[in-house]
């Protein structure tokens, strides 16, 4: 009986954990390449290398002509998602950087002064079943770096309550079935 309760609780926790898994492929660029991403525009001085937030790799973009990096993910209409990433600007100068969710700009930087990696996060409700994540950039004479891109489904509050109730019920059943 205790084993069955444990398996039930473990299955529920696994279901909740998978509900918030990162939907972005290679968002940390740790493959050392652009796997999962599509490049377009002026990408002469871009790459995956040592301008990273965590790990060994991050994306660096320093193009004269605007370039872009995109990825399309599956989403559920009406569901909320956390869109998050880290951005650094190596130096001021003439530059631009933007991040968008399905064509809607969530971050826009123009001629920004240099700054260390900074965390940006946005909670967005999906309005399509496929959502394009897009970063656009240009930078003279330096680079923007970005890393640790993630899109995670936000579980509904009632799901968290249900998990709590189920965990409590499992503990009570285990306590009740234990010999005195």
Image (cartoon, rainbow, N blue to C red):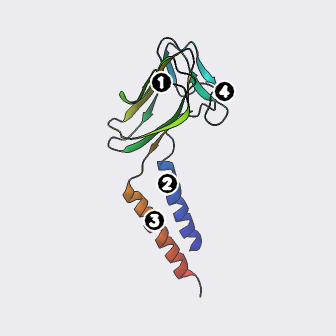
Q: Is residue 27 above or below residue 156?
A: above
Judged from the image, the secondary structure of the residue bearing numbered disc 4 is loop
Q: Which residue is nearer to you in this view: 79 or 110?
A: 110
User: Of the residues tagged 4 and 2, which is closer to the observer?
Assistant: 4
Looking at the image, do the residues carrying marks 3 and 4 touch, with CB atoms under 8 Å apart? no
User: Of the residues tagged 3 and 4, which is closer to the observer?
Assistant: 4
First in sequence: mark 4 vs mark 1: 4
Disc 2: which residue: 15
Disc 1: which residue: 112
| Badge 3 density bin: few <14, some 14–19, many ≥20, Cα 10 Å | few
| Badge 1 density bin: few <14, some 14–19, many ≥20, Cα 10 Å | some
Disc 3: which residue: 164
First in sequence: mark 4 vs mark 2: 2
Q: Which residue is nearer to you in this view: 109 or 14?
A: 109
Q: Which residue is nearer to you in this view: 125 or 139?
A: 139
Disc 4: which residue: 50
Q: Position of residue 98 (x, y in %)?
A: 43, 26
| Cα–Cα gap, marks 2 and 1 | 42 Å
Q: Position of residue 168 (x, y in %)?
A: 48, 71
Q: Position of residue 10 (x, y in %)?
A: 55, 61
| Cα–Cα gap, marks 4 and 1 | 21 Å
The answer to whether one can see residue 144 in this image is yes
Looking at the image, do the residues carrying marks 4 and 2 touch, with CB atoms under 8 Å apart? no
Judged from the image, the secondary structure of the residue bearing numbered disc 2 is helix
Q: Is residue 20 above or below residue 146?
A: below
């Amino acid at each position: 009986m205790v084993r069955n309760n444990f398996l039930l609780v473990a299955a529920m926790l696994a279901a909740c954990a998978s509900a918030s898994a990162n939907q972005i492929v290679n968002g940390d660029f740790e493959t050392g390449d652009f796997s999962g991403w599509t490049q377009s525009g002026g990408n002469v001085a871009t790459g995956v290398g040592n301008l990273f937030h965590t790990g060994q790799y991050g994306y660096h973009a320093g193009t004269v002509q605007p370039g872009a990096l995109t990825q399309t993910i599956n989403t559920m209409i009406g569901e909320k998602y956390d869109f998050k990433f880290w951005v650094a600007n190596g130096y001021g100068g003439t530059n631009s950087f933007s991040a968008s969710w399905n064509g809607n700009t969530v971050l826009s930087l123009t001629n920004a002064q240099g700054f260390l990696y900074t965390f940006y996060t946005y909670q967005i409700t999906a309005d399509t079943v496929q959502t394009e994540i897009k970063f656009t950039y240009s930078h003279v004479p330096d680079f923007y770096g970005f890393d640790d891109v993630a899109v995670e489904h936000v579980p509904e509050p009632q799901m968290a309550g249900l998990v709590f109730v189920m965990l409590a019920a499992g503990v009570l059943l285990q306590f009740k079935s234990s010999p005195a």
